[in-house]
Amino acid sequence: MLRGVLTVGGWTMASRVAGFARDILIAALAGAGPIADAFFVANRLPNLFRRLFGEGAFNAAFVPEFSGILATEGPAPAQRFAEEAMAVLAFWLLALTVLGEIFMPTIMHGIAPGFARDPEKFALAVDLARIAFPYLLLICLAALLSGVLNGLDRFVAAAAAPLLYNAFSIAAMLLLRPYVPTVGHALAWGVSLSGVAQLALLMWGVRRSGMKLHFPRPRLTPAMRELMRRMAPGLVGAGIMQLNLTMDTILGSLLPSGSVSLLYYADRVNQLPLGVIGTAVGTALLPMLSRQVRSGAEAESKASLNRALEYALFLTIPAAAALIVAAQPIMFVLFERGAFDAAQAAGSANALAAYALGLPAFVVVKVLVPGFFARGDTSTPVKLGVASLVLNLALNLILIWSLAHVGLALSSSIAAIANCAALAWVLHRRGHFDPDSRLLRRVPRMLAAAGLMALACWGIEQSLYAMLAPDRLWRWLGLAILVGGGGIAYLVAAEALGASALRELLATFRARRAARAG
């Protein structure tokens, strides 16, 4: 599992770094104004459906079944199952895409009702959404192919594909901007073109794996009916975090102009550890748990879940502490330039600190949910997710009046913490999760090490106050010293306190190096 985590995490890290370059360029060209707001809402729509239909509900139902068929019946039945699923998914997604293009103004009234107060901004959001919406069809099919590759324990192509999203977005801003009305139009075209590129890459990856998929006529076979039955509740449960963020967008559209953008930039920074750690661990864990559960190896599945939680928390707890302590210099160094001024950077930094408070919970949810999906249970995460969604909405309506956009971010974090606690409790009650002595011993030590790291980060930030001032070259150097110093402080403290998982990581690197040499 650790090898898969490192593979997915490495490629995801590369994609997130490219994503930062993309977001820095967006901030410089569009700032936090109406064009940026319109694009972020337009882009949220296909990405919401992608997380629900592609990475979320569909893969939650597809990957365990595909992995189980592969383990018990062999490659040929697994390939037939994947082909049938691909045909059914393509049929429904094509219909959804056509309907979305036709009824986009109505959809926009639902997802960003506040934009209706500005007809030009509303019309721009509709135009950009129509350009970007075909990404839904392309990336959901790509997500299915990623599920096939993950089920085959081939993680590279699936993890590398998101790099193309950021690469095409950057290229579109640099190359298409002179030929389209706004930078938002260039970005929207980049989104759709990146979907074509990602689908092509994953088709190539699946063929290289030896599984040549074809498009049969879509049919609701018994296997497909069972797949859709398992998928239906996951439409809410697997994408609950995205629904929470969409709720933030809806309410953010009612706040002063730029609020949606401030939340977006903060969420993008928060998504770096969430995507690298949570996605990597969850992606590698689900196929393994599915095989262990299908073969009756319950003790091994519990051990896998414990180690996944340990690795995730070892990296996530210090990341959350660092983002809370250093939110201001991070946002100022990364985004304060061009159309993105100091006041906007400060507002986005406050939202980042609020999101970071719930970062460990966001990641642990991604680790715990495969414990349900591997057993074919997609309904329990839905029920708990709906409760979390209701809590988030209630907190939004309470906190938005006093904290504005920061209240939306804080509500999401509190709801994620509640969801995480409920998932862990249910798994434990059913006998599928028992925190072992190693996990219980190391987590408090991780918290102590993260506390010492936070103090170190605060001290470094105070001593480098002048270096983090507006001079760009020195700002970047100061941020590098801050991040590097904090990381070293955590590793030293974790090793001294006995919280470190470095020995396991180093052993894995040595094993991989020896395998390559062999």
Image (spheres, rainbow, N blue to C red):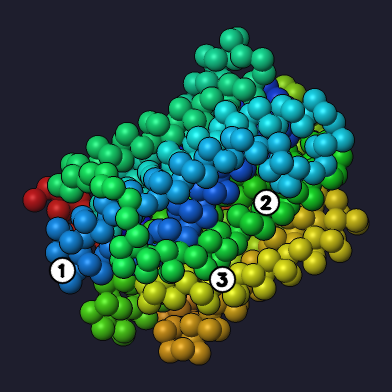
- Given contact means CB atoms under 8 Å apart, are the residues at marks 2 and 1 in contact? no
Task: Give the alpha-carbon distance from disc 2 to disc 1, as whole Å.
Answer: 40 Å
Label 3 sits on a secondary structure element that is helix
Query: What's the amino acid at mark 2?
Result: Thr
- Eyeballing the image, is 58 above or below 475? below
- Between 344 and 407, which is closer to the camera in this rendering? 407
- The residue lying at 84 percent from left, 45 percent from top is 254
Disc number for residue 73: 1
- The residue lying at 51 percent from left, 52 percent from top is 51
Q: Is residue 93 visible?
A: yes
Query: What's the amino acid at mark 1?
Result: Glu
N-term-proximal mark, 1 vs 3: 1
Q: Is residue 490 visible?
A: no
Disc number for residue 246: 2
Query: What's the amino acid at mark 3?
Result: Val
Neighbourhood count class around disc 3 (C-alpha, 10 Å): few under 14, some 14–19, many 20 upward: many
Quadrant including the N terminus = bottom left
- Given contact means CB atoms under 8 Å apart, are the residues at marks 1 and 3 in contact? no
Disc number for residue 314: none
N-term-proximal mark, 2 vs 1: 1
Kindly identify which residue carries mark 3. Answer: 382
Task: Give the alpha-carbon distance from disc 2 to disc 3, as whole Å.
Answer: 17 Å
Seen as rendered, the residue at the extreme right is 402
* Mark in the foreground, 2 or 1: 1
- The residue lying at 31 percent from left, 68 percent from top is 222
Task: Give the alpha-carbon distance from disc 1 to disc 3, as whole Å.
Answer: 30 Å
Seen as rendered, the residue at the extreme left is 518
